[in-house]
Image (spheres, grey):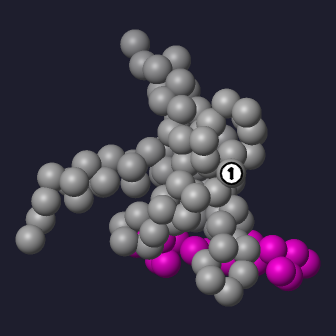
Amino acid sequence: MRTKDELFMLGEVSTLLQYLFMSEKHTIIFNNGLTDLQIRMDENFNIWCRNLQFPDIPESDFSEQMTTLYMLGVIQILQNTPPVEFKNAFANRWEEIKQITLANLALNRK
């Protein structure tokens, strides 16, 4: 059964994608259960992944793996990850990403 909580979680997916798109410097790092992955998005909306255990191997196209359900799982991981850019200002990496994204969107809307 579809719930309103699940409906609102889709907005979180939008925030994640907007964050990745806003800057080539915006990346996320998370552990997928096997290794640490670094994810970024290029200007053509392609999602690229680097396995940090093997940093010399080129990035791979990760677009097909980034399904809605997968992104919701990544968000849950980020909610339990310490912040990176503003370590004393946010409780976790996800809160940091949300605020950076919201601030950038506010500055770019008329």
Q: Which of the pair 50/98 is nearer the observer? A: 98
Residue underneath mark 1? 82
Q: Indicate whether residue 42 is drawn in magenta.
A: no
Q: Residue at x 62, y 48 (%)?
A: 93
x, y percent for residue 76: 48, 62
Marks counted in the figure total 1
Q: In this picture, is 63 found above or below 108?
A: below
- Left/right placement of residue 79 relative to residue 30 reads left
x, y percent for residue 37: 70, 72
Q: In this picture, is 53 found above or below 20?
A: below
Q: Is residue 104 visible?
A: yes
Q: Which of the pair 30/109 is nearer the observer? A: 30
Name, please, the residue furthest toward the right: 56
Q: Which of the pair 25/79 is nearer the observer? A: 79
Q: In this picture, is 4 found above or below 2?
A: above
Q: Residue at x 58, y 33 (%)?
A: 100
Q: Classify the position of the C terminus by image quarter.
A: top left
x, y percent for residue 71: 45, 65
x, y percent for residue 59: 74, 74
Residue 81, picture quadrant: bottom right
Please provide the residue range marked out in magenta: 50-67
Q: Which of the pair 53/95 is nearer the observer? A: 95
Label 1, secondary structure: give it.
loop
Q: Indicate whether residue 66 is drawn in magenta.
A: yes
Q: Main secondary structure of the magenta part?
A: loop
Residue 23, picture quadrant: top right
Q: Residue at x 90, y 78 (%)?
A: 56
- Left/right placement of residue 66 relative to residue 100 reads left
Circle 1: residue type:
Pro
